[in-house]
Amino acid sequence: MDPTRLFVKDAKRIIVKVGTAVVTRSDGRLAVGRIGVLCEQLKELNSQGFEVILVTSGAVGVGRQRLKYRRLVNSSFADLQKPQQELDGKACAAVGQSGLMALYDALFSQLDVASSQLVVTDRDFKDPGFRMQLIDTVNSLLNLRVVPVFNENDAISTRRAPYEDSSGIFWDNDSLAALLALELKADLLVLLSDVEGLYSGPPGEPHSRIIHTYIKETHQKEITFGDKSRVGRGGMTTKVKAAVHSSDKGTPVVITSGFATDNIIKVLRGERIGTVFHQDAHLWVYPQEAGARDMAVSARESSRRLQSLSSEERRKILLDIADALEANEELIKTENKADVVAAQKAGYEQSLISRLTLKPGKISSLSKSIRVLADMEDPIGQVLKRTELADGLILDKTSCPLGVLLIVFESRPDALVQIASLAVRSGNGLLLKGGKEAMRSNAVLHKIITRAIPDSVGQKLIGLVTSRDEIPDLLKLDDVIDLVIPRGSNQLVSQIKESTKIPVLGHSDGICHVYVDKSANMDKAKHVVLDAKTDYPAACNAMETLLVHKELVETSGFRDLISQLKAQGVTLYGGRQANAKLDLPLAHTFDHEYNSMACTVEFVDDVHAAINHINHHGSAHTDCIITEDRGVAEVFLHQVDSAAVFHNASTRFCDGARFGLGAEVGISTSRIHARGPVGVEGLLTTKWILRGSGQVVDGDKGVNYTHKNLPLNLPMKPTTSQANGHMKS
């Protein structure tokens, strides 16, 4: 639970206000799907013992749509040629109210929840007797687990526009909700809008950021509001006024989106969504309230300073990081051990604990890989292609950093070291979010690494995101963050891909196959298969499915392979054929990544059947064939559609360090930008640099294009044009 939302754990009586923009579509018709999701959430809260009160807008919008239709049906062609008068708002409200309430009643009835309608005006609240009767009625309804549904009775209201200047008690359903929150002593008011909360600027603008906590002393002067709601009377201005009034009087408020399927539930779980208003907000401390954008911008600024350094200066930073890790090895081990112990007590799976543990020699190995990376050729500013476009006009295609990377990873603290060193080598800014299970390990590694970065670059080159709630904000920063690389579960990767416009690089599954062909050397097969499965079963490049040619089923070599897998503690599951022939438990799916000492076995007719199986059930990560038939091997190597395809070698070789990349930021199964283990090259893009001598296009009349490829290592030589005062660089 976010520390700024701890107050929700004491909430029992909840008022939810839903606006016209949420309950209606853009054409004015009821958004039945959204209203249904709203009712489902309220039913869940009702069943959990919360006292739920609903304040709903939408009657005017629904009535207007209905009356427009009736007017169209009852009009002649001549009538339609005349100017159409605006429909009376009170008539719209009267017509729409019954339809709106009929829908709520039908939906709540389907969910086995009773609801009631209470239509009020501001004049009603001027009567103290009415207030007392209202409170008694609502309390009685709530005691019976009935959901009271409030709406302002616009049909008989005596108020006049502009509503913001009304001298009445409330002027719209937002202020009605705030009034009811105080009258009924609600513990929380949730205002649902068509945006995710209050923003620092128009929500559609790239530099606008959501304000998670409203502080009146600060934001009252900073925030300017745009137009009112597209269909209702209010908008964000009225919501903020109502929220400030309610929170000042003691009822906290959260403004959030009514378009999401579970935002009300998330609010009650204390998740950091929307904007919270609380009378004590000015007393709270927010270490990361401005964090997301500021952290990303700082990383970009630092990366530009890093790129301005010489190659040798960047190399020295890496060497200093390697030295610092070795010098602090005992401290790192202590913090990592504390994480492991906590994970064991929490009951985490052994595969996760295995990834979390920094095994003996790991720090030394990481430092060594960083030094290898430092000694590689500087990847920044390399000329990849040089072309003479015309005499004295030279075009270079050069390598340059991507910009700012956001890496979200689980469990493995060694990934932080690899990613940070790759970012430094490639000149990129970096934001890191590790799993909570590795919190202490990640914190100490981040501290050691950033301390080795000189002040001329700045320690903010590498930011460590400590709160999971910051991730949604970071994923919105497509104008500052250039690439997201998730390293973790299928669920994590899928969730990130669905939540951002930023390009995402990575893989969701590591369903790797080894196919043993009929011509395989079974001694090789045993070594490769055992290594692929047992060397590090929690790794994404571990074998998850063993495919075997059907002619091997009765051979002693294959039977011995199965026996050795079992002897090593591997639990075997069978496809339909293996289940029948080997009496193995039936595998429920071929699309499963075990990440443990378990795998699936299945028989196939030939190499083509193996290829089809892999292309259908694999995750395009790493797949291997074991065969002595080179022709069969070549068919497999070229037709398996995976990022890495091996012949007679363990799938565990698919690794950045083993590939000679120094380290890896992850393994990509995408087909754009980078594929397979992603090292320094995968974190670079290109820049075109054109050097001329005063040329202009002028309709291409005076340009004689040569488009001649030039050697990259050939020094620039004077051309004929230089004799005339034109320099060619």
Image (cartoon, grey):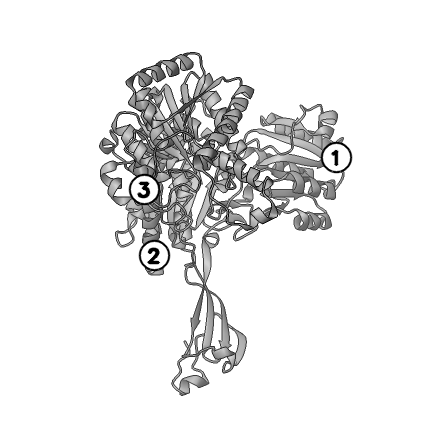
Q: Where does label 2 land, which residue?
A: 304
Q: Residue at x 22, y 31 (%)?
A: 283
Residue in the foreground of this view, choosing between 294 and 590: 294
> Does the rendering let one see residue 561?
no
Tell which circle, 2 or 3, labels the residue nearer the N-terminal end: 3
Vertical comparison of 626 with 700: above or below: above
- Is residue 498 rendered to the left or right of residue 228? right
Q: CA distance from mark 2 to mark 3?
A: 20 Å
Q: Residue at x 38, y 54 (%)?
A: 427
As drawn, the label of residue 385 is: none
Depth check, mark 1 against mark 2: the one in front is 2
Category of crowding for the residue at label 1, using alpha-carbon neighbours closer than 10 angstroms: few (below 14), some (14–19), many (at least 20): some
Tell which circle, 3 or 1, labels the residue nearer the N-terminal end: 3
Q: Where does label 3 land, which residue?
A: 291
What amino acid does circle 2 point to? Answer: Arg
Category of crowding for the residue at label 2, using alpha-carbon neighbours closer than 10 angstroms: few (below 14), some (14–19), many (at least 20): some
As drawn, the label of residue 552 is: 1
